[in-house]
Image (tube, rainbow, N blue to C red):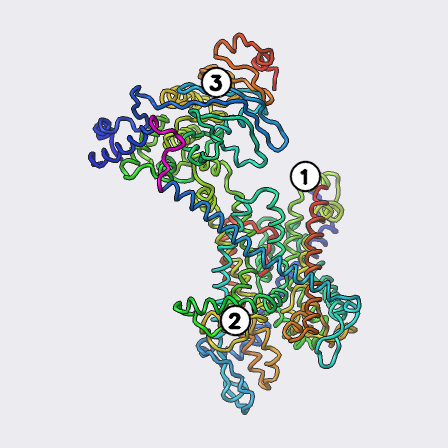
Amino acid sequence: MSKTSEGGADSSTALAQATQTVTVPWYQQRVSNSYRRRQIWDKILKGLILVAVGLVLIPLLDMLYLFAYKGLTVISLSDLTESTTAGTGLGGGGIYNAITGSLLLLGISAAISVPLGIFSGVYMAEFAGEHNRYASIVRFFSDVLAGVPSIVLGYVGYLLFVLSAGWGYSALAGGLTLSILMLPYILRTTELSIKRVPDSIREGAIALGSTRTSMINKLTLRFAIPGIITGVMLAVSISFSETAPLLYTALFSNYPPTALLHQPVAYITGIVWTFSQMPGTGPHDLAYIASFVLLSLVFLVNFIARVVLKRFSKI
Amino acid sequence: MSGNQELAQEDVATQDLMTPNDGTGTRGGSGFSIRDLNVFYRNLHVLKGISLEVEPHKITVFMGPSGCGKSTLVRVLNRMNDHVEGFRHTGQVLLDGKNIYDSDVDPVLLKTKVGMVFQKPNPFPISIYDNVSFGPKIHKTFKSKDALDVIVQQSLEKAGLWDEVKDRLKTSAMRLSGGQQQRLCIARAIATLPEVILFDEPASALDPGSTAKVEELMVALKKNYTVVLVTHNMQQAARVANKVVFLYKGDIVEIGEPPAMFENPKNPLTEKYISGHLT
Amino acid sequence: MPKTPTSDRIYKYVTALLSGSALLFIFLILYVLIQYSYPSFVINGLKFFTTTAWNPALGSNIVTKDGFSIMQGSSFGFLVYIEGTLVTSALAILFGVPVSIAIAIFLTQIAPMKVRPPVSFLVELLAGIPSVVYGFWGILVLGPLLLDQIEPFLASHLSFIPGFAGPVYSYGLLDSGLILSLMIVPIVASISRDVMIQAPIEQREGAKALGLTDWEVTRKIVLPYAKTGIIGAIILGLGRALGETMAVALVGGGANLLLHSIYSPVNTLAAFMAISLDGAFTDPTSQDVYALVELAVILVVITMLVNIFARALVKQGFIRSSEGVVRV
């Protein structure tokens, strides 16, 4: 198979190379083109990677800086306590209407999705066995739910709550739509957190004669709480970061909310959405303030979630 | 793949690719000269003032209880420690008279000259052939496929694995037993034509039969290479070593030769270790 | 064996019932979407998929067709928007994936230990920024940057490449594509990082000991190991890009024509849906609304398929998404 002459020629080249051991010091061997090329390539790629990191970090830091700077210089207490001036909607006043609106929406959506999500998570983690078909179906559809684009959910909320149920643009419509968005998140994180609690704890409790109910309530949940809270906080952060589900369910308003039905409400993301598109410093100022508030909230929630998780996972 | 017949023909032209001729029929023979080496991981002083000679064509053993610094010391020799955070050193480590930490030394090149076999066999999840040819392919040391085939074969022969795998070179390396995988790793290291081979507790994950094979291998390899072995197994050291360096907490306690060192240790610490009273 | 105590059984059934809420929501969504898109499917039929115009013909008369009242001469087509969705997502992947993988490599191979947590944190922070804020930043910073500096440069120097010739606009495809790519980086990078960090260290050490450079170790050992996980991450990122609404609505420029060049205004399914619904209310026949809901159905089907595919890769056990569910 091997052609002796070719093999011989190559082998003696290799042989010659190898015998260089004697005549050339080891650290000067093989500095051939291929070798230098490999080193250069390594350096180039490392440089490109650093460039990529910069390409991502620079816009991020620019965003943070811009909104922090603008937000802090423009903001004043009245901005948080006044509402956007009504009528021409040219953007004056503050974002109080949006803050109160967002809080109301958050309250409604959390009141629905958090209990639903946690109890569902408890069922999936504690009562549903490995081969429980119902649980698999629930899990599958929960994942499907998580994948529905937020604008589609907004449409659904409009068609279902604003139109069919006849609630009109309202906090309830918006809140309910948001809760559909939040549910899969809370369900999944609750399920995972409870599953992480070691079985030894469960067995210990049952061996002592406790019923499953009190065991779960008193023991397992307590261990799972840090994880559950983190999940809830992340879902909460999603709820006030979303716009699309609220555009046609809560609509928008220049006034703080006073009713659950038939009354549109404002929300912080809506401020950015509306006023970023208007020219002039007045509207933009409002958008800056709202962006600043949003980023602060996201930062805060993220930070707290991490701290909570770190602190309490040592139980 | 060349059969044994054809290789005999080639032998005349190529001799043994792995052991070039410098007149003595052996490799050039590299040795290390370590002079007052101190190693720090951040503020932890791991090796303290180490000075020793690693002689060519001999098996030098670094031995000692856990934490004595033997693994660190052996990893200095091929600069694997460079990647550890907080690594600092003072002193010199000379390979054939040249300090391996000089700025004009390429650490990547060094690793082709000083190969390493690890404690846990770590073949790549590719074929046996591809494992052994991995190094040569990267370093482009051979230009024709035939030459590469010869390298692979000779490396596997030197590692004592050729007969067992010659019919299944293209099968996955992961199918081999632990002992075979370790010999594959040895073959893989040999294929880059090193001068020195470092063994970091190569048999601690293997059964006694494979351990014996690896020890046999090391003894056979010292004819063409310089071998450094790290082990905590005293019997192993007694079996294979030409020189034993006993380390404790970063210091050299004693350097000696078996069997004398084991029967009449000069240092009380050594005595304690040998009798099993030191951990 | 003693009977299960009643409290346990009540607990079990109550929680089981509440778990059904996920199913209920899905059912409601499907029901409503089908109900309100049905007229559009019937009336527009296959033309919907071949028409570029979106014309509610509000000024004309009401006539009947297929049992529904429609505006005479109205015609609805999704081509502009599906093109927008696909092209912006493709751009997002094109720009975002290499950068994300580079970041993952940076975080697992190159960066010194002290630098890794802060950079990781910053990358994850990117994931939390609301899309309207991205869009606002796009209006304030990226748009002018593109309009004044980058696009004129590209148009004058690269006009021989199809799609790069002018005229240039500030809000358009390039703008949207860049912002979208920024938005998918956190997902792709963090999943890639999670997978890459699991590459067995013995093999990386073994390769290094054989004299491979850092990049070679990454290329030959780590990346092949992480391949499937990275692909899954990319698909999840794609899902996110497909569903993204507000940022594109703000910087896309709102097009109703097919794309001309990389600077053209663009509209995606999601962005168009967000912008147009209120206008659609003026259609007395509601056909505009029905057509929009048909767009919603198409968007859901596309994202669903992408997500199912991604989940199939997850089931092979190669991805570990740290929160368990990744929001699209």
Query: Residue at image x 49%, y 73%?
Result: C168
In the rendered view, tell whether residue C176 sits above or below residue C318.
below
| Disc 1 to disc 3, C-alpha distance | 43 Å
Q: What element carries label 3?
A: helix
What is the x, y in percent for residue B8?
Answer: 23, 27
> To which residue does mark 2 refer?
C172
> To which residue does mark 1 refer?
A200
Disc 1 chain ID:
A
The question of residue A29 being in magenta is answered with yes
Q: Quadrant of residue B270?
A: top right
Pick the quarter of the image with the C terminus of chain C.
Answer: bottom right
Q: Closer to us: mark 1 or mark 3? A: 3
Q: How crowded is mark 3: few (under 14 residues within 10 Å), some or many (20 or more)?
A: some
For the question of whether residue A131 can be seen, the reply is yes
**Amino acid tagged 1:** Ser
Left or right, residue B126 beside residue C171: left
Residue sitting farthest toward the top:
B264
What is the x, y in percent for residue A168?
Answer: 70, 77
Q: Closer to us: mark 2 or mark 3? A: 2
**Amino acid tagged 3:** Gln
Q: Give the range drawn in magenta.
A: A21-33
Q: Is mark 1 on a helix, strand or loop?
A: helix
Q: Is mark 2 on a helix, strand or loop?
A: loop
Query: Residue at image x 36%, y 32%?
Result: B191
| Disc 1 to disc 2, C-alpha distance | 58 Å
Pick the quarter of the image with the N terminus of chain C.
Answer: top right
Question: What numbered label is drawn on residue B236?
Answer: 3
